[in-house]
């Protein structure tokens, strides 16, 4: 009789950092860790560092024979092929056969999906979407990711890339995206990067207006700085969030009328701004909905720790693997 393996490794690859954990059947994360994603120009040294970071945890749970496999959530991750393909927020360009490379590195089976899809699965299994069959997960981090669940199933599309809502054009002819070269995408405005860019634009457009943000060199303005200034009552910083929420709310109205979800769940670093982002988002979402959709869709924050949702969702891929 084959001994049941007790643990799965979940890996969440973001544009800036990679978070990982070892997860049991109940969804308890026994070990968490993090390495940088953005300091590696090549995939091989990244995998070396990931292996080095995970090795002590693997030994702690009884060794590699206790691990059933590795699930990975990554930008532009293709569930069908196990490849990352032309991810705009990662340094590894082109098509990267990540599931194969990880499997070879760790000598374990590996499966890959889009990072936001992994977060959606984690939320459905363990968080705010538990029991829901129709919802959209929007991740607001370095970029804007999304996972769409309809009738209880992730929407993957014929090629595995359905649901790239962050790259839909919400402001035609608008801001140039720093990586894709497209203009006016949601990600260019409603990501942490977008918030920083909006703050810089507002400072340039309102040169005579006082702001705490003017005390900070342009290259050091990020979403955390904008948030801190907004909490201190800075008008420009607060206006940045009002503008960001407007853009996000308009986009969410489009998404609601497309799939009529029970809820939209916001996840990621930008949600730490709380009502600064939520109030304008909710206002502009409802304002742009047809009456048949108004006041029906819950707009809520994730109930899972930021690091956990995508890790749990990625690890869930492992339990679905055939032994």
Image: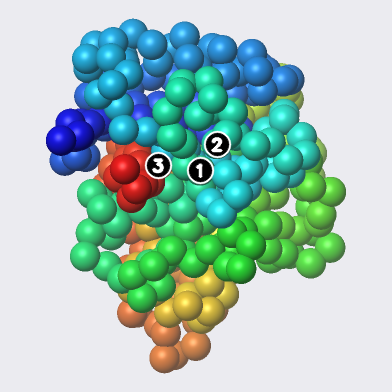
Please give the residue where the numbered disc 2 appears in the rendered image.
99
Q: What residue lies at 15% left-to-right and 35% top-to-bottom?
A: 1
Please give the residue where the numbered disc 3 appears in the rendered image.
314
Secondary structure beneath dot 1 equals: strand
Residue 112: mark in rendering? 1
Q: Is residue 56 above or below residue 38?
A: above
Q: Position of residue 189 (x, y in %)?
A: 66, 51
Quadrant in the picture for the C terminus? top left
Q: Quadrant of residue 220?
A: top right
Binning the other alpha carbons within 10 Å of mark 2 as few (below 14), some (14 to 19) or many (20 upward) gives: many
Dot 1 or dot 3: first in sequence order is 1
Q: What residue lies at 52% left-to-right and 33% top-to-bottom?
A: 13
- In this orientation, does residue 169 appear? yes
Q: Quadrant of residue 183?
A: bottom right
Secondary structure beneath dot 3 equals: helix
Q: Position of residue 251 (x, y in %)?
A: 58, 67
Q: Are marks 2 and 3 in contact (CB under 8 Å)?
A: no
**Number of marks drawn:** 3
Q: Residue furthest front?
A: 1
Q: Is residue 313 above or below residue 47?
A: below
Q: Position of residue 3 (x, y in %)?
A: 17, 31
Q: Quadrant of residue 37?
A: top right
Cα gap from disc 2 to disc 3, whole angstroms: 12 Å
Nearest the camera: 309 or 199?
309
């Amino acid at each position: 009789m084959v001994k049941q393996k007790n643990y799965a490794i979940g890996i969440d690859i973001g544009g800036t950092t990679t978070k990982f954990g070892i997860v049991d059947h109940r969804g308890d994360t026994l070990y968490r860790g993090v390495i940088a994603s953005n300091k590696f120009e090549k995939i091989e040294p990244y995998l070396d560092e990931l292996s080095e970071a995970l090795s002590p945890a693997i030994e702690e749970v009884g060794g590699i024979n206790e691990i059933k496999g590795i699930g990975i959530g990554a930008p532009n991750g293709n569930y069908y092929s196990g490849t990352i393909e032309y991810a705009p927020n990662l340094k590894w360009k082109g098509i990267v056969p990540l599931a194969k490379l990880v499997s070879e590195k760790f000598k374990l089976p590996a499966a890959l999906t889009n990072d936001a899809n992994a977060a959606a699965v984690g939320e459905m299994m363990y968080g705010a979407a538990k029991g829901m069959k129709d919802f959209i997960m929007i991740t607001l981090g370095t970029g804007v990711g999304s996972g769409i669940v309809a009738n209880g199933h992730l929407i993957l599309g014929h090629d595995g890339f359905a649901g790239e809502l962050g790259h839909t054009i919400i402001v035609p002819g608008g801001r140039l995206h720093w990586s894709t070269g497209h203009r006016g995408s949601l990600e260019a405005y409603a990501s942490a990067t977008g918030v920083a860019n909006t703050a810089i634009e507002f400072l340039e457009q309102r040169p005579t207006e006082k702001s705490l943000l003017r005390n900070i060199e342009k290259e050091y303005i990020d979403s955390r700085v904008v948030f801190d200034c907004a909490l201190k009552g800075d008008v420009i910083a607060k206006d940045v969030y009002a503008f960001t929420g407007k853009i996000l709310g308009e986009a969410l109205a489009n998404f609601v009328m497309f799939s009529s979800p029970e809820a939209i769940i916001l996840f990621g670093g930008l949600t730490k701004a709380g009502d600064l982002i939520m109030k304008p988002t909710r206002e502009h979402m409802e304002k742009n909905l047809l009456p048949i959709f108004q006041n029906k869709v819950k707009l809520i924050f994730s109930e899972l720790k930021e690091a956990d949702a995508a890790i749990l969702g990625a690890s869930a891929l492992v339990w679905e693997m055939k032994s």
